Image: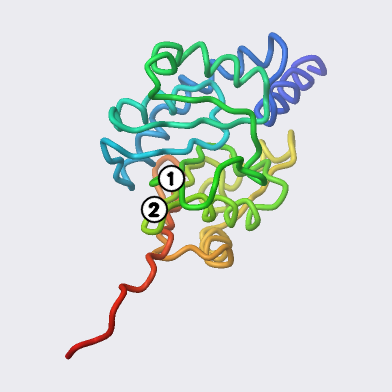
Amino acid sequence: MRFMQWLKERRLGQCRRPSGLLGEYVARRMNRYHYPLTSWGLDHVLVGKDNFVLDIGCGGGRTAGRLARLAPDGLVVGIDVSDKSLGLSRRVNRKAIQQGHVAIRKASVMEIPFPADTFHLATAVETHYFWPDITKGLAEILRVLRPGGSFVLIAEVYRCDRFDARNRKWLELTPMAYLDTTEFHDCFAAAGFDGIGVYEHTEEGWICCVGRKKRPPAAGGNFF
């Protein structure tokens, strides 16, 4: 029993920053396990064929590959702090990288190495739990979005009555952010996002939060 508890804790720790052989296993498993969750979340945003997209915490790279297929004339950039995840993401997306459709960079959400107003869309799947500061991370994402661009946060663990018992089991094994729908909305608003939407999949216990970067006022005066 002690060994199984240790193994669970090690696996959850690998979700934060995969490393070694166990990290490789966890990253590959996340590629498979998160597919339905990611599909549901991405249904809440539009991906243009020529969009520049940022995938934050790209993990095993499957989401970056999906986004590249949705934006065949654009570019998808995946960032992660884990060398193990970066290596797997590059292998999974080798062809797309060679074709110039995907790029994988080592970086943190707290300091995204791109100029302001770069991306049409940013995504974060199952990664906000471990950000040092959620509101500051959201503000950094907002900085690199183009005016009118969107960010979607997708997660399967959030504070809600129906799934609280299930979620508490994860919280007992590893520290992670545990927000309810109001707290998510407030974080997005505090970071400066506009048009905020918070959506729940009540049968699965999933959450999806979408925010937009405001467009600047149109030039010229009101002639009427």
Quadrant showing the C terminus: bottom left
Task: Indicate which disc, 1 or 2, sits on the residue closer to the N terminus.
Answer: 1
Count of picture labels? 2
Q: CA distance from mark 1 to mark 2?
A: 7 Å
For residue 172, above or below residue 180: above
Look at mark 1 in the image and give the residue it sits on.
119
Q: Amino acid at mark 2?
A: Gly
Residue at the spot 54% in from the left edge and 25% down from the top edge: 104
Q: Is residue 20 above or below residue 185?
A: above
- Give the residue type that dot 1 points to: Phe
- The residue sitting at the front extreme is 220
Q: Position of residue 122 (x, y in %)?
A: 45, 44
Task: In the rendered view, tell whether residue 173 sits above or below residue 200.
Answer: above
Q: Nearer the viewer, residue 91 or 17?
A: 91
Q: Are marks 1 and 2 in contact (CB under 8 Å)?
A: yes
Q: As displayed, is residue 10 above or below residue 153?
A: above
Q: Estimate the x, y position of residue 141 in percent, counting from the top left.
A: 54, 50
Please tell me the numbered disc located at residue 19: none
Q: Is residue 173 left or right of residue 121?
A: right
Question: Which x, y percent locates residue 154?
Answer: 47, 43
Query: In the image as oriented, which residue stretches furthest toward the top?
Result: 21
Residue 63 placement, left or right of 7: left
Q: Which residue is mark 2?
A: 149
- Element at label 1: strand
Secondary element type, mark 2: strand
Residue farthest to the right? 2
Q: Position of residue 99 (x, y in %)?
A: 37, 16
